Amino acid sequence: MAQAAEQTARGNVSAETLVFRRHPYLLYMSQTKEVISTLNSLIETLKDGQEGFRQASEAVQDHQLKSLFSEYSLQRSKFAGELQNHAIQLGEHDPEKTSSTAGALHRTWINLKAALTSRDDGAILAECERGEDSAVAEYKKAMEHNLPEPLADVVSRQYTEVKSAHDHVRSLRDAAKNAS
């Protein structure tokens, strides 16, 4: 114990590290809380996307875009449910169920922009792509955490699909911009 106090005093080992060495369960609990927090952030982001794509599907004129946005909305709902189940398995009794305030503001902006631009599909695509930028960034941030298996695989798979949707929406936005 004197050696541990000396290491702490010299700055070699933090007091927190010493506590975790003596009580590994506390480390596990700390890591679990961090993983649950990461999951809840992703769930909130997915709920933002679910609602954003639902509203975009109602605002666009093009039937193919309506179908695509509805499909992406359902995908986000499925992904959120998948992560909610993992959060419950980790001991979270009440995983995130709603979207964020920032997401609600972004959807309000999409609705306002749709109304001001006479439901311009290109403008709505541009706003959807901006929302997808946030989703991609949130997934990248989540993957930087040391997520346990099989959760890391789930998040990686979802990231691939979210990134693909982002890239597809961006290419549609660019095509709409070039057509006008």
Image: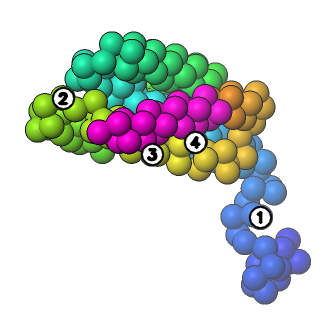
Numbered mark located on residue 18 in the image: 1
Residue 176 highlighted magenta (yes or no): yes
- Looking at the image, do the residues carrying marks 1 and 3 touch, with CB atoms under 8 Å apart? no
Mark 2 and mark 1: Cα distance apart in space: 60 Å
> In terms of sequence position, does the residue under pointer 2 or pointer 4 come before the other?
2
> How dense is the environment of label 4, judged by Cα within 10 Å: few (below 14), some, or many (20 and up)?
many
Main secondary structure found in the magenta portion: helix
Instruction: Tell me which residue sits at (37%, 20%) in the image.
Output: 65
> In terms of sequence position, does the residue under pointer 1 or pointer 3 come before the other?
1
Camera-near label (2 vs 1) is 2
Camera-near label (1 vs 3) is 3
Mark 1 falls on what kind of element? helix
Mark 4 falls on what kind of element? helix
Residue 86 highlighted magenta (yes or no): no
**Bounds of the magenta segment:** 159-180
- Looking at the image, do the residues carrying marks 2 and 3 touch, with CB atoms under 8 Å apart? no
Q: Position of residue 160 (x, y in %)?
A: 65, 33
Instruction: Tell me which residue sits at (49%, 37%) in the image.
Output: 171
Residue, disc 3: 134
- Looking at the image, do the residues carrying marks 2 and 1 touch, with CB atoms under 8 Å apart? no
Seen from the viewer's position, the closer of residues 27 and 99 is 99
